[in-house]
Image (spheres, rainbow, N blue to C red):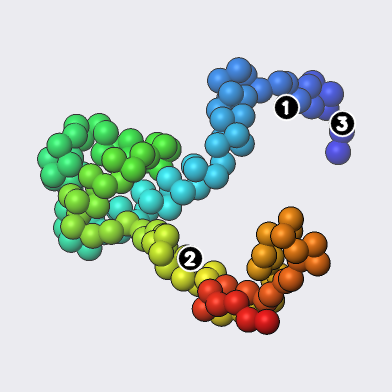
Amino acid sequence: MKFNLEKLQQLAQPLPDGERQQMEHQIENRDWLLLSVRLALKIRSLMAADGISQSELARRMGVTPAQVTKILSGQENLGLKTIAKVESALGKPLFSVDIEAPHEVSMRKRISYVPFPIFIKSQPVEKNLTSAYSQFDFATQTAFS
């Protein structure tokens, strides 16, 4: 096979600006773009299961059909407001988020009782230079000698 330098030079041309910018955008935004694609597929699946068209979804959401097309393209950075509109229009959740209530978190971290002695002064130092100390139990808030 004969080496064709002209063919190699044609293939090795730099990317046009538009293609380069699109590739950079996809690399920089890879994480949310993947989530957007997954959400779009989920929405399409729910729509197909319930027989809902794009125009019907747009009507239920109160947006234009063009906006629904953008959402279903998997290229939109969807905000929580838009996700809530889609869920409301479909009548089904798209995903769930596990957020523990603050009291649940603190209950797990709370230690019910750990007896450890600390020493506090039972008398002011200036009255008694030997400073009698006693143990104090924080759980019962009692002092014992």
Q: Residue at x 37, y 39 (%)?
A: 78
Q: Secondary structure at mark 3?
A: loop
Q: Position of residue 145 (x, y in %)?
A: 68, 82
Q: Secondary structure at mark 2?
A: helix
Indicate left or right for 25 with 7 as reference. left
Q: Are marks 2 and 1 in contact (CB under 8 Å)?
A: no
Q: Please state which amino acid type lies under the numbered disc 3.
A: Phe
In the figure, residue 98 lies in which quadrant?
bottom left
Indicate left or right for 25 with 70 as reference. right
Is residue 139 in sight in this rendering? no
Q: Which residue is mark 2?
A: 106
Q: Which residue is mark 3?
A: 3
Q: Which residue is mark 1?
A: 11
Dot 3: few (<14), some (14–19), or many (≥20) neighbours within 10 Å? Answer: few
Rendered-image quadrant of the N terminus: top right
Q: Residue at x 17, y 42 (%)?
A: 61
Mark 2 and mark 3 lie on one chain; the one further toward the N terminus is: 3
